[in-house]
Every structure is written in structure tokens, then in C-alpha cells.
């Protein structure tokens, strides 16, 4: 439990600034279907991330097909992006969350942020050979940019925060991963889901203290 909580410690610190997702907000229905038979091509926007790519051009791993630019998550209608999100790279969940937040659909944004964070953490844990200046660096950047604004909204209501993380866990378990197979990542899935479960338990068990800490920092509670 200690290791799991350390992995989520930075997230918890951010979330003290803000989770207000009510239980009555509708979540997208879990998308049934089979997991991907093999990993899909990396989105070109993801493949291009990192200083090595900027300096030397996009790097293609021999076992991976050319990058995919068939989906533009910034321009696709939100309803369609939600529909296809199970088949997308985890970074697209962050874009979805950011767009929903900007559209004042903040409760939905929190849900998709946590679903995306979980799947991105699983991906990184399952693929420790990823170049640190590419997908891992992009994850850190998204956590800071998208994560900060969403968590500043999110942590003001610990009960709703915990309930939303539980909904993200349930969605992940019930929904295919159309971007890459789940089976080879079973250990990473169990570990990262356990980490989020540990955070949920921490929030539920420390609601009063979290509220006191926010008040002492001059932050609002709900």
C-alpha cells in the first residue's frame, strides 16, 4: 500500500486544490467489444513528442507501424470522441477531459481525466522501455497542464471525488482497450488499479482532514 500511495502522492497534493463530480451525473456507457489484437499505431502527435523527435525527426520503432493521424481529438465532435475513446491512445482522454472542462462539462471532465490517467499509467508500467522523452514525458506534461485545472475543481468535495474515481475504475474494467491488448499488461493493470483504489480509500478515510487542509490554504470546499 505504501508504494501505491507514493505513486499517487503527487496527484493527491494537486487534488487538495480542488473534485466535484456528483453521483447523479451521467457517465458514458461502457463500450463492449474485444480488446485490440495488437497495439495500434501511435498517434503522430504523440510520436512527435520529445526533444529527440524535435531534433532528429520522428523515430519509428521497427515493430510499430507508421504513426496514425486519422483522428484529430481537438476537432472531433465531443460526442463522437467519447464514443471512440476506448480505441484511442491514453493521451486523447486528457484532450477529451480538457475540452469538456472548457465546455463547462466539468463533472464529465473529471471522470475522463481519471479514466485516462489510469490507462496511461498502465501503459507506462506495461512498457518500461518507452523512451523517457516521448510518452512518459508527455504523460508528465498532461498531468501538470490538464491535471492541474481539473484537480483544482475536483478536490473540493472528497466524497464526490472518491465516487468519481470509483466510476473510472468500473468503466476501465468493463470497457475494452481498443488501442492495445489488456492481456499482456495484466500485472500492470492490477498494480495501477490497486494504486487508484488505495487513493480512493485514503480520500474516504481522511475527508475531514482534506477539508481542513484546503481551508487552511484558503481554498474553497463544497
Image: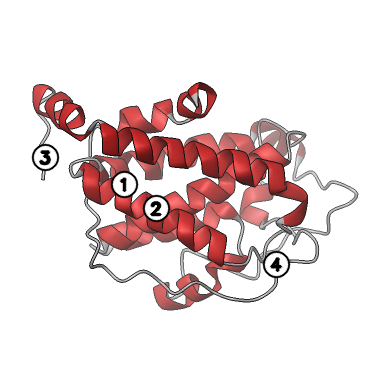
Query: Circle 3 — which element?
Result: loop
Which mark identifies residue 221? 3
Q: Position of residue 222 (x, y in %)?
A: 10, 45
Q: Quadrant of residue 38?
A: bottom right
Q: Distance from label 4 to label 2 (Cα)?
A: 22 Å
Residue tagged 4: 35
Horizontal and vertical percent for residue 41? 75, 60
Q: Which residue is mark 2?
A: 166
In-front residue for pair 202/94 = 202
Q: Secondary structure at mark 1?
A: helix
Instruction: Decide: few, some or many residues near mark 2? Use Cα within 10 Å; few <14, some 14-19, many ≥20.
Output: some
In this orientation, which residue lies closer to the viewer: 141 or 9?
A: 9
In the image, what residue occupies the spot 23% across and 34% down?
17
**Disc 1 or 4, which lies upstream in sequence?**
4
Point out the residue furthest to the right here.
62
Of label 3 and label 4, which has the lower sequence position?
A: 4
Mark linked to residue 199: none
2 or 3: tag closer to the N-terminus:
2
Q: Which residue is mark 1?
A: 162
Residue 155 in the image: x percent, y percent? 24, 40
Residue occupying the point 62% across, 67% down: 176
User: How many angstroms separate mark 2 from mark 3 (CA)?
Assistant: 21 Å
Amino acid at each position: 500500500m505504501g508504494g501505491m500511495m507514493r505513486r499517487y502522492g503527487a496527484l493527491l497534493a494537486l487534488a487538495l486544490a480542488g473534485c466535484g463530480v456528483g453521483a447523479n451525473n451521467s457517465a458514458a456507457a461502457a463500450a463492449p467489444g474485444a480488446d485490440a489484437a495488437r497495439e495500434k499505431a501511435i498517434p503522430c502527435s504523440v510520436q512527435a513528442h520529445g526533444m529527440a523527435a524535435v531534433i532528429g525527426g520522428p523515430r519509428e520503432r521497427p515493430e510499430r507501424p507508421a504513426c496514425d493521424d486519422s483522428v484529430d481529438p481537438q476537432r472531433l465532435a465531443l460526442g463522437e470522441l467519447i464514443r471512440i475513446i476506448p480505441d484511442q491512445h491514453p493521451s486523447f482522454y486528457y484532450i477529451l477531459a480538457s475540452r469538456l472542462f472548457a465546455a463547462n462539462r466539468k463533472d464529465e471532465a473529471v471522470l475522463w481525466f481519471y479514466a485516462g490517467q489510469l490507462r496511461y499509467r498502465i501503459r507506462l508500467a506495461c512498457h518500461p522501455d518507452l523512451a523517457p522523452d516521448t510518452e512518459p514525458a508527455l504523460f508528465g506534461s498532461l498531468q501538470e497542464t490538464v491535471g492541474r485545472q481539473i484537480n483544482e475543481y475536483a478536490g473540493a468535495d472528497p466524497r464526490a471525488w472518491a465516487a468519481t474515481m470509483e466510476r473510472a475504475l468500473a468503466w476501465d474494467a468493463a470497457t475494452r482497450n481498443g488501442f492495445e491488448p489488456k492481456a499482456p499488461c495484466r500485472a500492470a493493470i492490477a498494480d495501477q488499479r490497486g494504486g487508484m483504489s488505495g487513493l480512493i480509500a485514503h480520500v474516504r478515510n481522511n475527508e475531514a482532514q482534506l477539508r481542513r487542509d484546503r481551508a487552511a490554504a484558503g481554498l474553497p470546499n463544497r
